[in-house]
Image (cartoon, rainbow, N blue to C red):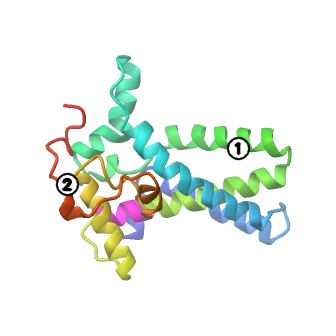
Amino acid sequence: MIGQFLRHGSNAVLCAAVAAIACAGALGRVTLVLPAVLIGVALFFGTEYTTHRFLLHARPLRSPFILRLQHRLHYDHHLEPDRLDLLFLPLWFAIPAIALFAAVYFAITRSGAVTLSLVLGNLIGLTYYEWVHFVAHIPYRPWTQFGRWMKKYHLWHHFKSERHWFGVTNPAFDVLNRTYASVEAVDRSARTRLLFK
């Protein structure tokens, strides 16, 4: 299962980057600031919801290039939720996105150590997100009750209503933004697979 996870998308690179930065910090090669790492994880979980809801579920744009991006990054995942090659972020998207976040962090903090720590937190959050998303889409029963519930939670988004349950790793931002609902209270949508058709 871990081998399958590492073979797709940017997962092997994400895991290697987290391990390299953490090891470099443990060996004293770079300075890591633990509160900034934790803030980086928290920032990732905030962007997880907003990116999924407002960017990945954005209306199709007329530009053929942007429309191809929208399909590859999310629309096609809804169309074929069992295809692992459509499940994970591709490297060509992940690397520029991480670089952009790093540039913003450095512009704000003017500290290499704080920037690297924030990026490490983002990478930890993203790796966890990719793992939880992977587990939701494969025939695997999570060990914990919360894990089993989150798997069902994400699958409701794919098979019940694409307008609810945007959180993949946790429901907090769905609750805050009123996109959480009891599954029984939501009518089945005809657009969970064909977004905007």
Magenta-colored span: 131-137
The disc labelled 2 sits on which kind of residue? Phe
Q: Report how far apart the C-alphas of labels 1 and 2 lie in the structure.
A: 35 Å
Kindly state the secondary structure of the residue where label 2 is placed.
Answer: helix
Q: Quadrant of residue 60?
A: top left
- Residue toward you, 49 or 13: 49
Residue 6 place in picture, x, y as percent:
45, 60
The residue lying at 76 percent from left, 67 percent from top is 34
Q: Work out whether residue 17 can be spotted.
A: no
Residue at (76%, 65%) from the top-left corner?
A: 35
**Image location (x, y in percent) of residue 65:** 40, 21
Q: Which residue is nearer to you in this view: 56 or 130?
A: 56
Instruction: State the mark number for residue 102.
Output: 1
75 to the left or right of 45:
left
Residue 31 vs residue 165: left or right?
right
Q: Disc number at residue 159?
A: 2
Q: Nearer the viewer, residue 86 or 78?
A: 78
